[in-house]
């Protein structure tokens, strides 16, 4: 009995739970008698690039609207050209704790969210600033209990945890007066562990993909005047290689089946643009992010269809037919209190789902406090909420960072 599509169906996309239970159960029943051929589909191709976004707490607090945030965020955000506006060295270490709450026990994950440094070089004119570090790009999380049909399919539990992280280097230069250009390169790595098991112990399926890849982003930022930044960045096609292990266990029959899959997925360029308005005591940020999900490209030399042919053509057609291109809108606000070394942040995001015809909303908030001249702390909270099968579900994250300015 092959259950892999139960794990690689929309339930494994932690936010893509807007699918009827009857359809899921029908899919499980169909796959109960299938062979492990063509085990991947369009959702497996989407997965390496799609999860709960994480990173620097201040960037998170302003709703990831960081393409033109400049020196307000102590990282490059979504545009390496931001680094060019920094005049001081900054060392940041961050920690995060997240929780997925659904119709079963909460699933919590914690760990280091980022370790980053900004390093301006002394130059005669303009600016030359480097950035490098480690950060969690996004996280996978799911905890869900489902009901069977009482005969062929038992009640089941789904869980998912993991993340994609990056090690990066970036450089920004003031190419002309108030025009900053930047570029970065990232080495991406991570894992995902998806478990589907029957509550009566009749089966246990475990899917463990391991991700490795690279991506590159170039960007430009124009400081139009002291009150306005305009910016644009392009993330070039990222290539992710996937080594996937699938274990299907049947404890009552004392049987275990093991399968290995290898494939790669290429993401189309990601376009980001926006601005930042700097008023007395208040900053406003906006970013639009356009993702061409329909242009994902799947490639494998050891996955075949039912006719024994390479499955690439069929899976790529499935990607084009079932995914949609989306534009994400991100808004941020920063409030700098007079006479106090305290800064408050808020953010809001509208994120259309690439696999389904609905959008989700993300609310975030945070603060930073300067403890002394060279040391500050930052905190952020974000909440994703949606409804599946009349059950309210959510993913929340708290992040704390320690920042050294020197």
Image (spheres, rainbow, N blue to C red):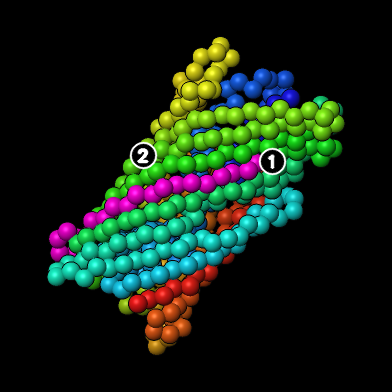
Q: In which image quadrant can residue 134 be found? A: bottom left
User: In the picture provided, is 22 more to the left or to the right than 38?
Assistant: right
Q: In which image quadrant can residue 4 be found? A: top right
The residue furthest top is: 307
Q: Residue at 46% of width from left, 32% of height from top? A: 264
> Where is the C terminus found, in terms of image quarters?
bottom left
- Residue 36: percent from the left, percent from the top? 64, 22
Q: Residue at 69% of width from left, 41% of height from top? A: 195
Q: Which residue is mark 2?
A: 237
Examine the rendered structure and indicate whether residue 7 appears above or below residue 54: above
Q: Residue at 35% of width from left, 55% of height from top? A: 169
What is the spatial separation of the Cα atoms under label 2 and label 1, in whole angstroms? Answer: 30 Å
- Residue 24: percent from the left, percent from the top? 68, 32
- Residue 163: percent from the left, percent from the top? 55, 49
User: In the picture provided, is 103 more to the left or to the right than 44?
Assistant: right
Our reading of the magenta stretch's main secondary structure is: strand
* Secondary structure of residue under mark 1: strand
Q: Which residue is mark 1?
A: 195
Q: In which image quadrant can residue 31 be found? A: top right
- Residue 164: percent from the left, percent from the top? 51, 48
User: In the picture provided, is 171 more to the left or to the right than 102?
Assistant: left
Residue 176 is a magenta residue: yes
| Residue 401 showing in the rendered view | yes
Examine the rendered structure and indicate whether residue 33 appears above or below residue 330: above
* Secondary structure of residue under mark 2: loop
The magenta stretch spans which residues? 175-195
Residue 1 is a magenta residue: no
> Where is the N terminus found, in terms of image quarters?
top right
Q: Dot 1: few (<14), some (14–19), or many (≥20) neighbours within 10 Å?
A: many
């Amino acid at each position: 009995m092959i259950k892999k599509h139960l794990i690689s169906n929309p339930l494994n996309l932690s936010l893509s739970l807007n699918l009827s239970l009857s359809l899921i159960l029908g899919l499980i029943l169909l796959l109960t008698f299938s062979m492990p051929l063509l085990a991947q589909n369009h959702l497996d191709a989407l997965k390496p690039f799609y999860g709960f976004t994480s990173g620097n707490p201040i960037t998170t607090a302003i709703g990831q609207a960081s393409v033109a945030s400049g020196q307000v965020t102590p990282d490059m955000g979504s545009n390496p050209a931001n680094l060019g506006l920094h005049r001081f060295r900054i060392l940041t270490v961050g920690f995060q704790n997240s929780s997925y709450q659904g119709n079963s026990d909460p699933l919590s994950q914690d760990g280091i969210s980022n370790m980053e440094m900004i390093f301006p070089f002394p130059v005669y004119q303009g600016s030359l600033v480097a950035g490098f570090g480690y950060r969690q790009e996004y996280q996978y999380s799911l905890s869900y209990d489902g009901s069977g049909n009482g005969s062929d399919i038992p009640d089941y539990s789904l869980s998912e945890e993991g993340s994609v992280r990056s090690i990066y280097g970036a450089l920004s230069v003031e190419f002309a007066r108030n025009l900053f250009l930047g570029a970065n390169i990232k080495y991406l790595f991570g894992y995902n562990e998806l478990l589907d098991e029957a509550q009566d112990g009749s089966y246990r399926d475990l899917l463990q993909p391991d991700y490795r890849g690279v991506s590159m982003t170039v960007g430009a930022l124009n400081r139009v005047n002291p009150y306005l930044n305009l910016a644009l960045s392009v993330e070039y096609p990222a290539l992710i290689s996937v080594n996937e292990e699938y274990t299907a266990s049947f404890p009552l029959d004392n049987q275990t089946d093991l399968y290995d899959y290898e494939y790669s997925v290429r993401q189309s360029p990601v376009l980001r643009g926006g601005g930042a308005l700097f008023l007395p005591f208040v900053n406003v940020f906006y970013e639009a992010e356009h993702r061409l999900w329909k242009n994902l490209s799947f490639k494998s030399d050891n996955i075949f269809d039912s006719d024994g042919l390479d499955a690439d053509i069929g899976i790529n057609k499935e990607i084009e037919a079932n995914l949609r291109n989306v534009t994400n809108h991100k808004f941020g606000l920063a409030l700098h209190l007079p006479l106090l070394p305290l800064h408050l942040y808020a953010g809001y995001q509208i994120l259309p789902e690439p696999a389904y015809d609905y959008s989700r909303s993300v609310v975030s908030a945070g603060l930073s406090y300067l403890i002394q001249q060279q040391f500050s702390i930052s905190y952020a909270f974000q909440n994703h909420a949606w409804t599946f099968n009349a059950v309210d579900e959510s993913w929340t994250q708290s992040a704390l960072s320690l920042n050294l300015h020197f």
